[in-house]
Image (cartoon, rainbow, N blue to C red):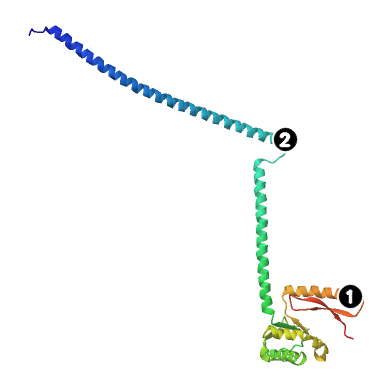
Amino acid sequence: MAAVDSSVLDAMIQKAVTAAVTAATNVLHEEVKKTFDKLSDRVETLENVVAGSKQQVSSLQQEVSAMALIIEDLRNEVNNKNPGAPMWSEIVHKAVETKFEEVTVELSQVEKSIEESKNRALEMKYREDKRNNIVLFKVPECPPGNFDQIIKHDTDFCMKLCCDILEVDMAREDIKSIYRVGKRGSTPRPLLVHLSGPLLKNRVMQSTYKLRDAVDFKDVVVSHDMTKQEREQCKQLVAEAKIREANDDSGEFIYRVRGPPGEMRIQKIKKRV
């Protein structure tokens, strides 16, 4: 085999290297181009997003500016139409004060309702405490002295009144307590008597009409032990009964208040001949 000239060999090697480098360069260029194209697409997309966002922000800014102008125009219009009109802060303050007044009124109504309920409960308790009591007026008092002697004097009088005059069947033990109301003075103090039960108390009250025939007891008055509210009601009824009797031209009737406390009424009674 003939020997190959060294220059020719060098040329062949150089050509092969050049071809390989060119091919590799072409491949790298294509890859770089593809990558660049992808990056370009992404950049364009981002730019579009940014541009869209900028446009939205700009639109929002324009809307906010427009709303600010509208509000300012409205405020100016209100002030121009009525220069003496209160400011917004005054309007809000007045609204708050009005609401506070409404709440205060509601609170007062609740407090009033609670107080009324409390008073009704106390009134019921007072009535329950007094339902077995009677009060004797114009009963002569025992001279000042020993407490036991005073109690005996008043108890003896009450027993004689109830048993002998009113003809009510009762024992000394039926008087649970007895005492004078108020300070001693020139006139006899009322005598409060606590009896053993409501039935006995009712029998006593139903028999008081017999007092008008008792000479020694004709001045004595027997009454229910009433609460303040019941006393006020009784006074009003007594006053009305007097007016009715005064306006009765026949002269044949008297008007009296009858019934237990809380159920009192004016009764028209024919005069005794």
Q: Which of the two labelled residues, at mark 2 and mark 1, occupies the earlier sequence position?
A: 2
Position of 21 with respect to 113 (left or right) is left
Q: Position of residue 46 (x, y in %)?
A: 43, 27
Q: Nearer the viewer, residue 38 or 144?
A: 38
Position of 265 with respect to 3 (left or right) is right
Mark pair 2, 1: CA separation: 71 Å
Quadrant in which the C terminus appears: bottom right
Specify the label residue 81 is tagged with: 2
Where, by quadrant of the figure, is residue 29 drawn?
A: top left
Q: Residue at (15%, 7%) from the top-left corner?
A: 8
Q: Is residue 113 visible?
A: yes
Rendered view: 270 above or below 50: below
Q: Amino acid at mark 2?
A: Lys
Q: Is residue 191 visible?
A: no
Q: Residue at (67%, 44%) from the top-left corner?
A: 91
Q: Residues within 10 Å of mark 1 (few under 14, many from 20)?
A: few
Which residue appears farthest toward the right when viewing the image?
Answer: 249
Rendered view: 2 above or below 129: above
Q: Amino acid at mark 1?
A: Ala
Where, by quadrant of the figure, is residue 244 drawn?
A: bottom right
Name the residue beneath numbered marker 1.
Answer: 246
Q: Secondary structure at mark 2?
A: helix
Q: Residue at (17%, 10%) from the top-left corner?
A: 12
Position of 231 with respect to 269 (left or right) is left
Q: Nearer the viewer, residue 193 or 22?
A: 22
Where, by quadrant of the figure, is residue 213 drawn?
A: bottom right
